Image: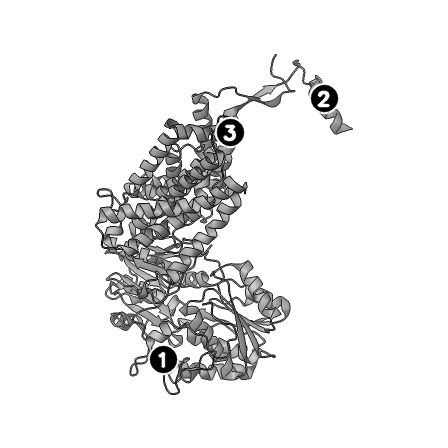
Amino acid sequence: MKPAGGLRPRLVKRLLPSRRIRVAVRLIALLGAFAVAGIFLQATGRGAGAVYRAMWTGSFGSPYGQAQTILAAIPLIFTALAVAVAFRMLLWNIGAEGQFYIGAFGATAVAYSAPDWPRWLLLAAMVVGGLVGGALWGLIPGALRAFFGTNEIVPTLLLNYVAILLVDYMVNGPWTDPATLGFPLGKPFSESAILPLVGNTAIHSGIYLALAAALSVSMVLSRTAWGYKIKVIGSNARAASYAGFSIPRNMVAVMLLSGALAGLGGMVEVSGVVHKIQANISPGFGYTGIIVATLARFSPIYLVPMAVLFGALVVSGTELQTLGLPSDIVLMLQGVILFFALAGELFVNYRLVWRAGTVSDHPSTPAPVSNRAADLEQAG
Amino acid sequence: MNMKVMSRAGRSKRWSRRPPVNRTARLIAAGTALLLGAAACGTGSGSGGGDSTGGDSGGGGDQKVVKAAWVYVGPRNDGGWTTAHDNGRLAVEKEFGDQVETDYVENVPEEPAAAARAIEGFARKGYDIIFTTSFGFMDPTLEVAKKYPDVVFEHCSGFKTAENMANYFGAMEEAKFLAGMAAGAATENGQLGKVNAFPIPEVIRLTNAFMIGARSVNPDATMKVVFTNSWFNPPAEKSAAESLLDAGADVLTQDVDSPATGQVAGAAGADWVGYNSDASKFAPQAWLTAPVWDWSGYYIDRVQAAIDGTWKSGSYYGDLADGIVDLAPYGEAVDAKTKSQIASMRKEIESDQFEVFQGPVRDQNGEVVVPEGETPPLEDLLGMDYFVEGIVSKLPS
């Protein structure tokens, strides 16, 4: 069988995609995204090369950029972890944004009520505050889903607004800093409520919490019986039921953990970056976390480099503006990457073959029977 | 949502509300020296560029080029707040030509990490003076200012300063008062409507100033107010404007950034007073005027000071007399009588014979809040939390 004019592309399922295939396809997808975006950039007249160089210098190519990239990645690691954990049971947690805010709320409540505690104690209590706040916010949709069969997407999404408005209310009233003359900023945290920096860098020690969270989640999911249970439930709920696993109970547990992770992210952000509570502590970390987790195939380990990549995209965004590019270009680039990555997943599981069925060398040869039927249909 | 919750809220602590003797609201803290040097070059006088540098020759030959940057919260073509700042930046370019290099970033979120990153990006690139134009940038500006003592920073609408960080804003209530007069004269049924962003003291004060202005020419005028909880949300502004028309208003105005209110007014045959920038082109039939910002004078002064090496920190609160707030050109619907009334009030305000909030001022329940013959103390204006007589809507509590 030789390739000929009558070739048609077919998708053939790969039975067991090898590791090499998986890595290669994803790398190609990433490169493809940058290539296609490069065409757009070239069309804007600035030259894709110059733009990518600027992005590189702004994000990874300098110590300052590296620190900024990591700082931008930290909240994304937490929200992506929240999304990834929930997805183990095929639950879509769209509410990491709200859980992040409530975690910040919980941590702030602790920081304001015991500002004079020693740093280690206060920070530990704030971590608990963040975890508990986020967990409660995960519990509500988790319990609704587990016991009443309510779809979790809408409640998690809507609870975001509740959380954001709750923080708005607090910074407009009870927690407002009198020095701001009635404007929505919270009182500054005491020294002991602030996460110390890592060595001489601009990076706060929340990075350790983020990495520890990713590692522990990975361990729990892959090395414990409970992790196995929820994986089974996620893959085949009926089989899990037969095996005697309680689906509602595990659903609640997963959403508690998911919410707690995002909540911890909120704690780290107010303690490490903002140093007080205020509105706008997140420009949508919870939503970007969904993209990060999806691109990392919901792997708690792979989502870390993916979060760093997104951190770099965000950080280089302002860099690009100074080249005269509109601020939306980074959003476009994120969109293109997501599109290619999702398309890439198709090729991890399927391969494209050019097949001509019953074939001959003549271009005029009639198309294979199966296709001819389709042609006939079209013609008639 | 809420990305701009805190933009341009807030006020200078050292707000120079008219000390009784020297009644010009100018640079307060250490800025007097600057003004001596720069006032002569003034506001966009055009010819000043070359010979304005102290010691050097007129051409400014081997002088270092001063790099000035702006950090914007919105898109620079928002037709309102950010457009006004960007016009100021362009005026700086025009004034100084090759002596300056300007740049900006737009759509910078008020999320602290992102704001600090945008500001620090300019500081690291060797910019000499950086203007940040949203209230939410205040703490990030201060944080970056501490790290870059050799760069000077200017924050708009906040209240914090440092050795190398000044703040600046203006007495918009004066222009709102004059614009209110135009609205009060234009309304046929005496009912005004206002689309507001947030129930914060700044917006409340400007709303009251507008009402007082309207009632100064039309004592029976009333006003309804709708809050959108966003500075820039055209669909929400549109529906708020429509609800005000449904409630009977025949003149609309706004404390939000887009021209959506005017487009609604134009489509319904009502009149419109805009805000921030001249937006008459969006609804020429409806256009009366707009209280607008003109930052060019301040920006030129400050960049001049940076060029001369005489920049000093301080708090600036400019007013009508300074030209930092102004009225946009009138539309056809404003009659000659109203124009002359506004012109004479403007003179009184500029010469400090009249103050917008001078007593008697009553709140919407009829209680006297500022007695006859008095002007409210500074902190009352800063934290204004009541609507004045004539405003029908209640503040959310």
Q: Which of marks 3 and 1 is in front?
A: 3
Q: Whole-percent x and y of residue A179? A: 30, 65
**Amino acid carrying mark 1 in the image:** Pro
Q: How far apart are marks 1 and 2 (CA)?
A: 88 Å
Identify the residue position indicated by label 2 in the image: A372
Q: Which of marks 1 and 2 is in front?
A: 1
Quarter of the image holding residue B294?
bottom left
State the SS at label 3. helix
Determine the residue located farthest toward the front in the rendered image.
A244
Q: Whole-percent x and y of residue B6? A: 40, 60
**Amino acid carrying mark 2 in the image:** Arg
**Cβ–Cβ under 8 Å for marks 3 and 1:** no
Mark number for residue B376?
1
Q: How would you rate the neighbour count of disc 2 (Cα within 10 Å): few for under 14, some for 14-19, many for 20 or more?
A: few
Q: Nearer the viewer, residue A222 or A295?
A: A222
State the SS at label 1. loop
